[in-house]
Amino acid sequence: MTVTWLTVLPGVLFGIALGVIVLAYAPQTVRTSDALARLGEPSVSAAGPTVQLTRWDRVGSWLAQHLPAIKFLAPPTKDLDLLEMSVSYFYASKAKAALFGFAAPLVLPIFWQLVTGQASAMLLAPSPIFAIVLWFSVDTNVKARAAKARQEVTRFMGVYLQTVAVALLGNTTPDTALSETANLSDSWVFKRLRREYAAADLTRVSKWDALENLGKQLDVPPLVELGRTMRMSEAHVSLREQLLASADQLRDQVAAATRKDAERVTRRATVPVYLTLAVLIVLTLLPSIANLFLHQ
């Protein structure tokens, strides 16, 4: 690679990346001549409302269709379903992160060239590395968010089980108890349950089968256990004791998870505290040490 290309290449790559980002986020404009030409054309009303796809939606959809079905490239479908995130949006987020990771380090060779007047191909190496790291950072973020969402589902399910057990004290069928209890809260967990119950009513599937299928689909064991417990109502078995026992078990799981999170946060805070103390000790002892050496 010649010196000329080494001099021009960082700026060209940075300009291309910046242009792609600006083009992706720039508002779409309509030319006046095209708009006036369409005024006289007959329009056909659509059957339903249409959603206009953005450029990033199209990029994500293209990546979802053309990327090979390899394990480390495949989308985490269960996590995405739990977070109610589409696969195209997931891949669009990965493309944005990779583009930013590729463009950001290109400032370094440009700055180096302006300061020293020399170009170096080694300074271009961080761009693909940063792009790959930020590409997979989206997967890590999705998994972390899905783990928190599953903990939240477990916490809400403990309350839900207790409320269903209370509803069963009256002259209420298990099917009605599940439906009425799901209407008591507007949290996203209860909204998801209401949607599944509505779909089960349309497809004539029992609500406990819907709960078990949803638990397997989202990898949420409490939903699977609730579905299996409620299925025992078909054998006219009293469910109240089983529901209360399951609620106590979920409460213990939530408490154990909370303790682990607190211990993890405490361990993470230990290093900054020690570093701060070390800096304070050095600043406190530095004048005395300096005077000792100066008076020798």
Image (spheres, rainbow, N blue to C red):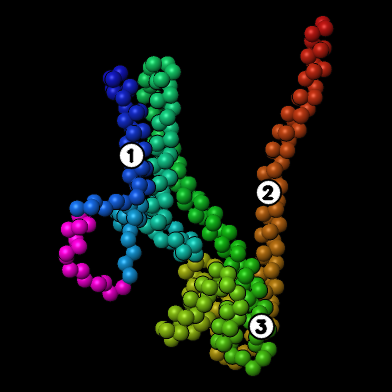
Q: Which residues are magenta?
A: 34-48
Helix, strand, or loop for circle 3? helix
Any part of residue 70 in sight: no
Where is mark 3, residue-wise?
A: 165
Q: Who's the residue at 81% across and 12% down the image?
A: 291
Q: Closer to us: mark 1 or mark 3?
A: 1
Any part of residue 10 in sight: yes
Helix, strand, or loop for circle 1? helix
- Is 286 on the left or on the right of 228, as rendered? right
Spatial separation of the CA atoms under disc 1 and disc 2? 41 Å
Give the residue type that dot 3 points to. Ala
Helix, strand, or loop for circle 2? helix
Indicate whether 269 appears above or below 256.
above
Q: Closer to us: mark 1 or mark 2?
A: 1
Q: Quadrant of residue 119?
A: top left
Where is mark 1, residue-wise?
A: 19
